[in-house]
Amino acid sequence: MLTLDTAGFDSMPWLAPIDDQVRPGELLAIVGPNGAGKSTLLRLLSGFQTPDQGRVMLDGLQLRQWSVASLAKRRALVAQQERPAFAWPVRELVALGAQCGDDEVADTLRELELDQLASRSVLTLSGGELQRVMIARALCQLKSAEKGARYLLLDEPTSALDIGQQQNLMRLLHRQTRHSELAVVCVLHDLNLASRFADRVWLMHQGYRIDAGHPGDVLRAELLAPIYRAELDDIACGDGEGALLAIRR
Ligand SMILES: Nc1ncnc2c1ncn2[C@@H]1O[C@H](COP(=O)(O)OP(=O)(O)OP(=O)(O)O)[C@@H](O)[C@H]1O
């Protein structure tokens, strides 16, 4: 289990302490306006930044106590707009650092509709193609774990994707959480994707997590409109499903 134990930052970037857990088998969406602290929270969960207060624990051990190699098999972070420095072929970049087999790399490329690009240099890819390659690399990195839950942390993974690719990626992530000991944490600006695919939502505002729960309870126009300073309406809410938000006409 990945646990935030009153973890936060005292100074910039400031983040009010949070107590909660990321549970294997769930897709957790972190939402909130620009500058709310979403990426900061994701860095905290990844262990790339150590909290000033509290602790972030994986299976009872603080993240900073894990060896780099062991932690890399259990959690992977794809930050916003990552760009590779070298002209790796797609297949090699995706397999880099992963101890999974060629078949698993090929499956991941196919699932993200990257198989036609496997031999291309990553420096020649479009923004959306490269975004999917970086996510494929992180998924393969986590396939190296022999045991234990794994945590995939994605900062705005759909920002460069067209609507079809957004849905394909979110369906894939959702499916993988159902069939393996994987938890996916996504920072999302698209509230409708969060509403449709997330099991839980954390709502951030000005460095505070101000709400957490089922998408249908958190993603309500009444709550979100003043926070985003946007004109929103709830347009649909089926049984057990999150609300769908629309721009008010
Ligand atoms: N190293 C830093 N030093 C000072 N302030 C920082 C630092 N990193 C982030 N901040 C500030 O902390 C706040 C939260 O930043 P963060 O990147 O977590 O926001 P975000 O919710 O991910 O925003 P966005 O949706 O725009 O990506 C912002 O106001 C940002 O300017």
Image: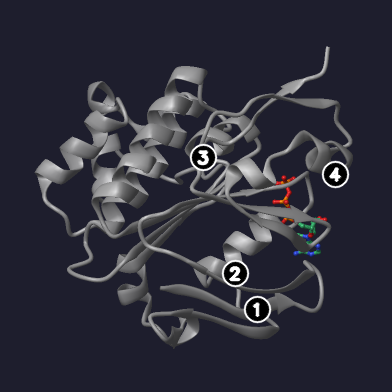
Disc 2 or disc 4, which is closer to the eye? 4
Disc 2 residue type (three-letter)? Leu
Q: Of label 1 and label 2, which has the lower sequence position? A: 1
Residue 42 horizontal/vertical position (percent): 58, 60
Q: Which mark is residue 44?
A: 2
Residue that badge 3 annotates: 157
Please tell me which residue is depicted at 43% across the width and 64% down the height of the picture: 23
Residue that badge 1 annotates: 7
Residue that badge 4 annotates: 227
What crowding class fits label 3: few (fewer than 14 Cα within 10 Å), some (14-19), or many (20 or more)? many
Please tell me which residue is depicted at 43% across the width and 23% down the height of the picture: 165
Q: Is residue 241 left or right of residue 89?
A: right
Disc 3 or disc 4, which is closer to the eye? 4
What crowding class fits label 2: few (fewer than 14 Cα within 10 Å), some (14-19), or many (20 or more)? many
As rendered, which of 120 and 139 lies closer to the eye? 139
Distance, label 3 to label 1, CA atoms, is 24 Å
Disc 4 residue type (three-letter)? Ile
User: In the orientation shown, which residue stands out farthest toward the top?
Assistant: 249
- Is the CB of the residue bearing disc 4 within 8 angstroms of ligand 1? no
